[in-house]
Amino acid sequence: IDSDLTLSVVSGFAVLDRSVSATDIQRLLGHDSRGFLRSFRFQSIIVDGRFHKCKDFDITNHVSTLMVPPTLQPEAHQEWFLALMMERSNAAFSALKPLWDVTIVEGYLGSRTLLSLRFHHCLGDGATALDALMSMSDEAAAT
C-alpha cells in the first residue's frame, strides 16, 4: 500500500560486463512470448482500480540511460549508484502510463553497465522482477 512515506515499488538491478543500448533493452523486454511485456499489466494503466490496456503504449517512454558522472572516482561508484537506487525507489510513477521503468547506467567501474528495473507492486512481486531480469539475460546470451 502506498503512503506519503513509502511507495510499493519492487526494484532490482544487474551488473553487466558490457555496454548495452536502450534499443537492445527495448528489444529484450518485448521479445516474443518470453519478454517482460508478455504480461498485460506491464502495458496497462490503472483506471478506477482496474487495469486498462494503454492505447498509446510506447516502450521508449519506459527506458532511459544515465552516465556515471565522469569526474566520479571508481571507489565512489557503488555509493553513487546506491543513492540513485534509493532516489528511484522513492520516486512516484506517472498514473498516465504503465507503472514501471528501466534505467541503463553506463560507465560503472569503467566499462560496466548497470541495468535497473523498478515497477509498482500491483504489477508483480520480487519473483516477477527476477523473472524479468533472467528472461532478458537468457535472451541476451542467445544473441
Image: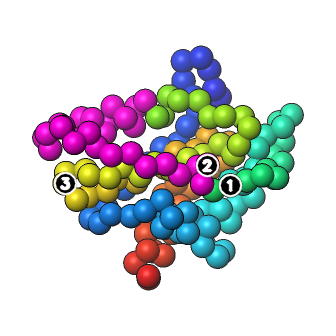
CA separation in Å, label 3 and label 1 = 31 Å
Instruction: Give x and y (percent) for residue 109.
Output: 19, 51
Identify the residue position indicated by label 1 in the image: 58
- Position of the N terminus, as image quadrant, is top right
Up-down relation of residue 127 to residue 122 (above or below): below
Query: Considering the numbered disc 1 on the image, is that residue within a helix, a strand or a loop?
Result: loop
Up-down relation of residue 6 to residue 104 (above or below): above
How are the colours assigned in the image? rainbow
Query: Considering the numbered disc 3 on the image, is that residue within a helix, a strand or a loop?
Result: loop
Identify the residue position indicated by label 2 in the image: 61
Residue 27 shows in the view = yes
Side of 95 where 133 appears, left or right: left
Residue at 26%, 65% in the rendered image: 17
Segment colored magenta: 60-87
- Position of the C terminus, as image quadrant, is bottom left
Query: Considering the numbered disc 2 on the image, is that residue within a helix, a strand or a loop?
Result: helix
Bin the neighbour count of mark 1 within 10 Å (Cα to Cα): few under 14, some 14-19, many 20 and up: few
Identify the residue position indicated by label 3 in the image: 110
Name which residue type carries label 3: Gly
Residue at 63%, 26% in the rendered image: 2
Instruction: Give x and y (percent) for residue 18.
Output: 29, 66
Instruction: Give x and y (percent) for residue 98.
Output: 69, 46
Residue at 26%, 39% in the rendered image: 69
Name which residue type carries label 1: Asp
Q: Foreground residue, 9 or 97? A: 97
Is the Cβ of the residue at disc 2 closer than 8 Å to that at disc 1? Answer: yes
